[in-house]
């Protein structure tokens, strides 16, 4: 299996960045994509809405369904899942991409920001998985893919930004638990994380601006790695914490120069690798 043609993907945070890149890669196969995100009106600093992303999916060769989804709301999640099933007949893949970030220490993290990260990252991932699983259990090759880092309980990953690490590791703990819980039923649950910083709006606006973007790779590397994972047999590929370049290498892709924002620039490693 090397194509997502005819498959239905429910992707959170798909209006921009890595989520949209995964959506467009699937669309080129002829997949159905549920663009589940909050942005309905253009933002001054963040390009793209669920509607512009859906248009791009259609232009790339897929079918799109734009759904307003704040992953903090079980009602909005369930409504989008119900609409996806009514429109496309089921759900084959869930990509938990929606995330909030604040690289702040304990004294610099307001509880409002702490709550936001945990509600979107950990709780949102659990809630979306819970809502999609009844349909994934009926699918032919069902996958859940969380955009979260490898679980590694070392102090160095927590000390600089403990609240954010806890929220992202919560997504990874969902992988660990759900992979075991649903292995016998054939639902694959995996995590994917980048080796380097990826050039997204968050990097541009929050994490160093142009200098950081120079040392970044494009979201396409994550999209291509996700495609490799999501086209694997679900019963043979679960419970893994994948790194993007390792996934591509396993698929025979070793020249990663085309993914660099600035050819030849020194790449900046990601926080958790």
Image (cartoon, rainbow, N blue to C red):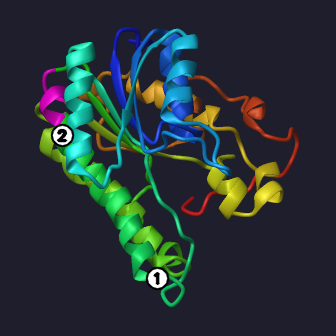
Q: Which residue is mark 2?
A: 131
Please provide the residue range marked out in magenta.
Answer: 133-138
In this rendering, position of residue 143 left or right of residue 111: left
State which mark lies toward you, 1 or 2: 1
Q: Position of residue 175 (x, y in %)?
A: 29, 49
The N terminus - image quarter: top left
Task: Inspect this view and state whether residue 196 appears.
Answer: no
In this rendering, position of residue 122 left or right of residue 98: left
Task: Inspect this view and state whether residue 41 appears.
Answer: yes
Q: Residue furthest bottom?
A: 107
In this rendering, position of residue 109 left or right of residue 264: left
Real-space CA distance between mark 1 and mark 2, rounded to the nearest whole angstrom: 30 Å
Q: Secondary structure at mark 1?
A: loop
Q: Which residue is mark 1?
A: 110
The crowd level at tag 1 (other Cα within 10 Å; few <14, some 14-19, many 20+) is few
Q: Secondary structure at mark 2?
A: helix
Vertical placement of 195 versus 88: above or below?
A: below
Residue for point 36% across, 25% down: 9
Where, by quadrant of the figure, is residue 186 drawn? Answer: top left
């Amino acid at each position: 299996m090397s194509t997502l043609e005819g498959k239905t993907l429910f992707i959170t945070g798909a209006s921009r960045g890595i989520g949209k890149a995964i959506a467009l890669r699937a669309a080129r196969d002829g997949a159905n994509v549920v663009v589940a995100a909050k942005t309905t009106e253009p933002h001054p600093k963040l390009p793209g809405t669920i509607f512009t992303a859906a248009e791009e999916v259609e232009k790339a060769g897929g079918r799109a369904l734009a759904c307003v989804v704040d992953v903090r709301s079980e009602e909005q999640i369930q409504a989008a899942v119900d609409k996806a099933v009514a429109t496309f007949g089921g759900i084959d893949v869930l990509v938990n991409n929606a995330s909030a970030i604040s690289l702040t220490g304990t004294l610099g993290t307001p509880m409002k920001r702490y709550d936001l990260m945990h509600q979107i990252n950990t709780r949102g991932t659990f809630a979306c998985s819970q809502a999609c699983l009844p349909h994934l259990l009926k699918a032919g090759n069902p996958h859940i893919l969380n955009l979260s880092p490898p679980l590694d309980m070392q102090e160095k990953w927590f000390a600089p930004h403990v609240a954010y690490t806890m929220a992202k590791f919560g997504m990874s703990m969902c992988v660990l638990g759900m992979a075991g819980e649903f292995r016998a039923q054939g639902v694959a649950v995996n995590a994917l994380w980048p080796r380097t910083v990826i050039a997204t709006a968050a990097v541009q606006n929050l994490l160093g601006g142009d200098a950081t973007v120079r040392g970044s790779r494009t979201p396409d590397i994550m999209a291509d790695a996700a495609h490799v994972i999501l086209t694997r047999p679900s019963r043979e590929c679960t419970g893994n914490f994948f790194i993007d370049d390792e996934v591509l290498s396993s698929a025979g892709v070793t020249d990663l120069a085309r993914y660099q924002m600035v050819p030849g620039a020194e790449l900046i490693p990601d926080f958790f690798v």
